[in-house]
Image: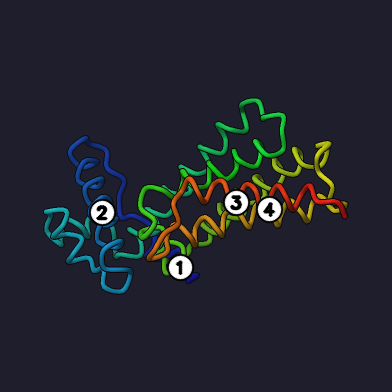
Amino acid sequence: MTTGRRGLQPRKQPRQARAEATRQRILTAAAHVFAEYGYAAGTTNRIAARARVSIGSLYQYYPNKDAILVELLTRHLDAGIAAAGRHQDGEAPESLEEIIRLFVRTSIGNHRDDPQLLRVMAEQGPRSPELLDKIARHGRERIAYAHALFAGHPEVRVADTYTATRLAVSTIELVVHQLLAAPDPVDSARLEDELVTMITGYLTADR
């Protein structure tokens, strides 16, 4: 759901430790409430009750539940960007299979904490222009990094490496999200092995 900026920003940024602790408590409570009840039933009253703050105190920090969910989604995205950055700063593995395993493992790690909350954030949450821009930029950076690894790799057999890179990166993200957030999630270790085999086979198959 795309929406305007108005109503999606926190009301204030805490400057004191006690205020920051309250904000963190609200966010933690909201994560549990959204995961348990979903977006529609995850009301600010339920969030305030779980956080053990008054509804008035909650509204001092956030104008509505949309702003809370946007902040949770932004934090999740920032954590994913940071994890990807750590891998990109290091030396990439030599074998194509291990390169792909690194991408898959990073994606699984970023989805492991609370898959049900991630489903709510990804499929039902509001989108501000700033958040959409950050998502797009992060996607372009992931694809550029992966393409640089695939394009000159001796094991890659596809002719159009850029399109293949986009397919590989998108497949990893979508499959990991769908299967870890499913009501009957796939075991993460099995998912990693099978997805690595699938993507490696696609990139190395003789055409």
What x and y, as percent, mark residue 111?
A: 44, 50
Which disc, if any, is residue 32?
A: none
Please tell me which of labels 3 and 2 falls first in the chain. Answer: 2
User: Which residue matches tag 4?
Assistant: 168
What x and y, as percent, mark residue 78?
A: 47, 44
How far apart in space, not on screen, are marks 3 and 2 (Cα)? 41 Å
Three-letter residue code for mark 2? Tyr
| Label 4 element class | helix
Camera-near label (3 vs 4) is 3
- Counting labels gives 4
Camera-near label (1 vs 3) is 3
Marks 3/4 in contact by CB < 8 Å: the verdict is no
Please tell me which of labels 1 and 3 falls first in the chain. Answer: 1
Three-letter residue code for mark 3? Leu
User: Which residue matches tag 2?
Assistant: 61
Q: Is residue 75 above or below residue 2?
A: above
How far apart in space, not on screen, are marks 1 and 4 (Cα)? 21 Å
Badge 2: residue crowd in 10 Å (few <14, some 14–19, many ≥20): many
User: Which residue matches tag 3?
Assistant: 195
User: Which residue matches tag 1?
Assistant: 123
How far apart in space, not on screen, are marks 4 and 2 (Cα)? 40 Å
Please tell me which of labels 1 and 2 falls first in the chain. Answer: 2
Q: Is residue 35 above or below residue 106?
A: below
Please tell me which of labels 3 and 4 falls first in the chain. Answer: 4
Three-letter residue code for mark 4? Ala
Residue shown at 28% from the left, 58% from the top: 62
What x and y, as percent, mark residue 186?
A: 45, 56
| Label 2 element class | helix
Camera-near label (1 vs 4) is 4
Residue shown at 15% from the left, 61% from the top: 56
